Amino acid sequence: MRVLRLSKERYMETPWKAGDTASVHCPHCGDIVTARYARRSVALPRTRLRVRDVLVSICGACDAVLAFPRQSIAQFREVGVGK
Ligand SMILES: [Zn+2]
């Protein structure tokens, strides 16, 4: 499904955990920002699905969701996305 390609394989192989931070480019800020990992309830674009308590990276400046770590993708599959 298209939405899952937003993160462009930028994940690290090691599992992330809530509270971790990383320097990433935020398309909303147009700059390199410090993203922090946190558990969020995420609404999936173009669907009515919501995934609760999924680990995502969030821009520290504008609060946009920037990426879904690889470990979170399994949670999307559980709700039927990516089949
Ligand atoms: Zn931002």
Image: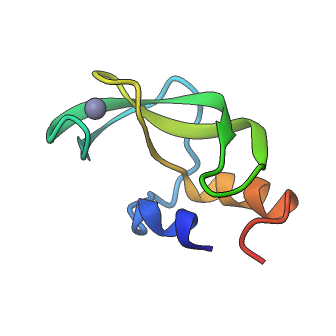
Could you say where residue 42 lies in the image, as x and y percent from the top left? Answer: 66, 38
Q: Nearer the viewer, residue 66 or 23?
A: 66
Q: Residue furthest left?
A: 31
The coloring applied to the image is: rainbow
Placement of 82 over or under 43, stated as above or below: below
Q: Nearer the viewer, residue 55 or 30?
A: 30
Could you say where residue 56 lies in the image, as x and y percent from the top left? Answer: 55, 40
In the displayed structure, does residue 38 sit left or right of residue 34? right
The quarter of the picture where residue 16 lies is top right
Q: Quadrant of ligand 1?
A: top left
In the displayed structure, does residue 59 sit left or right of residue 31? right
Placement of 77 over or under 37, stated as above or below: below
The quarter of the picture where residue 40 lies is top right
Quarter that holds the C terminus: bottom right
Q: Residue furthest bottom?
A: 83
In the displayed structure, does residue 67 sit left or right of residue 71? left
Quarter that holds the N terminus: bottom right
Could you say where residue 6 lies in the image, as x and y percent from the top left? Answer: 44, 62
What is the tally of numbered marks visible in this picture? 0
Q: What residue is at 75 percent from the left and 65 percent from the top?
A: 81
In the displayed structure, does residue 35 sit left or right of residue 28? right
Q: What residue is at 53 percent from the left and 53 percent from the top?
A: 14
Placement of 35 over or under 3, stated as above or below: above
Could you say where residue 25 lies in the image, as x and y percent from the top left? Answer: 22, 46
Q: Nearer the viewer, residue 3 or 38?
A: 3
